[in-house]
Amino acid sequence: MPQEHQEHAARIAEFRDKVLYKLTYSVGKDPEHAFTHDWFEAVALATRDYLVDDWMGNTRRMYASGTKRVYYLSLEFLIGRLLLDNLSNLGLLEVAREALAGLDVDIDQIRQLEPDAALGNGGLGRLAACFMESMATLGVAAHGYGIRYEHGLFRQAIVDGWQQEQTESWLDFGNPWEFERPEVSYLIGFGGSVSAIPGEGEPRHFWHWAEGVRAVAYDTPIAGWRGNSVNTLRLWRARAEGELHLERFNAGDHVGAVEEEARAEAISRVLYPADSTEAGQELRLRQEYFFVSASLQDLMRRHLKQHGDLDLLPQKAAIQLNDTHPAIAVAELMRILVDVHAVPWSRAWQLTVGTLAYTNHTLLPEALETWSAGLMERMLPRHMQIIYLINAEHIDSLRARDIHDFELLRAVSLIEEDQGRRVRMGNLAFLGSHSVNGVSALHTELMRKTVFSHLHALYPQRINSKTNGITFRRWLFQANPRLTALLVEQLGEELLDRPDELLVNLRADADKSALRKRFAEQRQLAKLSLCSLVQDRIGLQLDPSALFDVQVKRIHEYKRQLLNLLHTVALYQAMRDEPTTAWVPRVKILAGKAAASYQQAKLVIKLANDIARTINHDPTLRGQLKVVFLPNYNVSLAEQIIPAADLSEQISTAGMEASGTSNMKFALNGALTIGTLDGANVEMLERIGDEHMFIFGLNARQVEMRRQEGPVAGEVAISASPRLHEVLQAIRSGVFSPDDPARYTGLVDSLIWNDHFMVCADFDAYWQAQAEVEERWRDPRQWWRSALMNCAGTGWFSSDRTIREYAREIWGVLE
Ligand SMILES: *Cc1c(COP(=O)(O)O)cnc(C)c1O
């Protein structure tokens, strides 16, 4: 024991010395005069030094063992803050806390100064971040590849109830976690022409691109739990190619030279802010090709240096494409193999398919990427040729299999001919990969039946399912230290290393009233902190004993924030109609960003704020109902909201949410879910048990059947439901928008005539399920028992489990 004490004291002293050294020599400040931000920077830099030692060791081991590497290509990484993540995974959190306390610095204060790295829109980008952490934890030799956007997702301000987008400049104070690697850079070509030189066998093709943009690497170390291994997230920044630009400058074409620079650097300037919808802009295609080409050039260089044999590529490299955004990798890898390394076409195709794997994230037709063939020909002429050639061989191979059905050939072609010629990136990714996976069981089943039904019939082995997961290090240990401490006390220290296996043991304790009581107490403390956050941010006082009913995610029609708002209004009306009834006090909490161009979603935000203003100021409710719209939802805000949630809203139109991951975060923290049979909710139901969830509404098959009958009129449901009728009447007539009574007539009318998202169709079932929620809440014994069962049943949704499945079944790494 004394020796342990001594070691601990020595580690504290070492950490303190490192921080002081960084403060002095890297930040250039005297401790006497340092600002809080200087301390943040010094602590981050000191922490990074600890990472670097493990990182180098890891890199050396990877080279020495010649192990197969995984490359995760993603246009988005929604990382959030890294200080706590790194300290906690390195086992230094307590050391740092005490060392800083000795310097009169509060770690909880300085960690708030770190800006969120918001290089993603929502679930897809957050998944990539959770995967990076799990791969490091499990010791998978992985590299993440993406773009180092100068501006991440916009900051959302709410002005007069409307969303306003402001630029997010997360790099203004520098980024202490990254290493710039000016020596690691590649030229990325655009435009120009292709010439073919006949030789023996296949002719060689040369792409004479017209514009070259340089991709420069920036590396961030990603540490696994207990510092097990440290992998690299390599993000590319676009730079104009210096010499070309200087030549023009000297020739007097100053404006042209600067324009060219701006055009090149625009590639890594800003993240496209749309979630699940595609803008189809030229700049977006430039971003996609830019990061794919840089990443493939980089990994090919590493492969050749280490193994020297292209034939070994599928044995030594697995490339995972996160959605279709990097799908151009199929053509780029073919180009590198065939044009640069003179690999014969058919062998190159084997290597490509053997190396690439593709994850599909959405079935929404507007989100299935296609690019006009004209744009592709102009920007990437050689890739367009390669795509045509892949397509010709694909169609020929089908004819050789005696498949002549015209409709089928049309559906599986890489080229869509309906509205001008377009390249289907989903089909390209499918054909060029040996594995195509969905992200929940239901989503995968729907993929087989809908978007990829024809390709699935031709390649029945290719589609597989990998249900998403979340990293428990961030979403339990860091976000909710109080609950973590309680769980460790209950289940033992080992929980920290194997939460996915051990959490289920909590089930046996769900009937212990002392545990339920303590579970409730930790929630109460989390709710109190959220109350003070709400007070600070929007000046609203909340009752911490009320039911906290939470829906936080991107604002999208299919996620149906509108259904939640209709329920809010119905509750409001019921409370006003029966003021003497003892209602369950409730706080509705919403947060989320709408794509800047998505008018309908932005109107929903305004409606939420209009409803909040009306309800929060109505004295007849005696505070029994409050509505909160928290601005600027991001990872850090999620970490503060989720531990305080009693009820988790996962109410998407069935068949439309591929998986969802906030559903898992909430359940892990012990919230009860009200939700539809959609995405991963279906599998949560299997593991948590239907007596502990509130499932309602149409299922995916029923939704599909209704839609097949033509436009779904909400009218039918409205005339059958006096409650819904009254709600819509109030919104339509301007009860919540007296300043502009017609503001919501269009919104309500569209529900009446075409309720595509089944908001009206599901309303009564939702109301009923909410009534059951209240009944459960009135019985604390049952409520907290269910809360424990939710936490206990969520172990399987760890991204460690997901990554083990990818590793074994797709990548062929890990036993
Ligand atoms: C988890 C998470 C998401 C995904 O939420 P869903 O409800 O699954 O869409 C989006 N944004 C942030 C900041 C998250 O942490």
Image (spheres, helix red, strand yellow):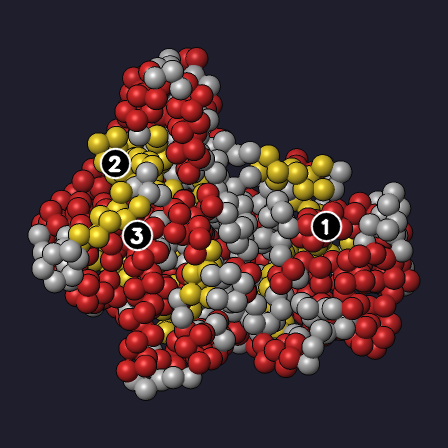
Q: Nearer the viewer, mark 2 or mark 3?
A: 3
Which residue is nearer to you in this view: 613 or 781?
613
Mark 2 to mark 1 CA distance (whole Å): 44 Å
Indicate the position of residue 492 as horizontal and vertical percent values: 36, 60
- Seen at 58% across and 45% down, the residue is 633
Q: Secondary structure at mark 3?
A: helix
Judge the density around disc 2: few (<14), some (14-19), many (≥20) Cα neighbours within 10 Å.
some
Mark 2 in CB contact with mark 3 (< 8 angstroms): no
How many marks overall?
3
Say whether residue 469 is left or right of residue 250: right
Q: Secondary structure at mark 1?
A: helix
Amino acid type indicated by mark 3: Arg
Amino acid type indicated by mark 1: Leu
Question: Disc 3 marks which residue?
Answer: 382
- Quarter of the image where the N terminus is located: top left
Question: Disc 1 marks which residue?
Answer: 603
Does the closest atom of ligand 1 sit within 8 Å of the Cβ of label 2?
no
Question: Quadrant of residue 488 in the image?
Answer: bottom left
Q: Nearer the viewer, mark 1 or mark 3?
A: 3
- Seen at 34% across and 50% down, the residue is 381
Q: Nearer the viewer, mark 2 or mark 1?
A: 2
- Seen at 21% across and 42% down, the residue is 54
- Seen at 80% across and 61% down, the residue is 748
Say whether residue 131 is left or right of residue 646: left
Which residue is nearer to you in this view: 432 or 390?
390
Indicate the position of residue 631 as horizontal and vertical percent values: 64, 42
Residue 785 vertical placement versus 67 (above, below): below
Judge the density around disc 3: few (<14), some (14-19), many (≥20) Cα neighbours within 10 Å.
many
- Where residue 185 is drawn, which disc sits there? 2
Nearer-N-terminus badge (2/3): 2
Indicate the position of residue 275 as horizontal and vertical percent values: 54, 53
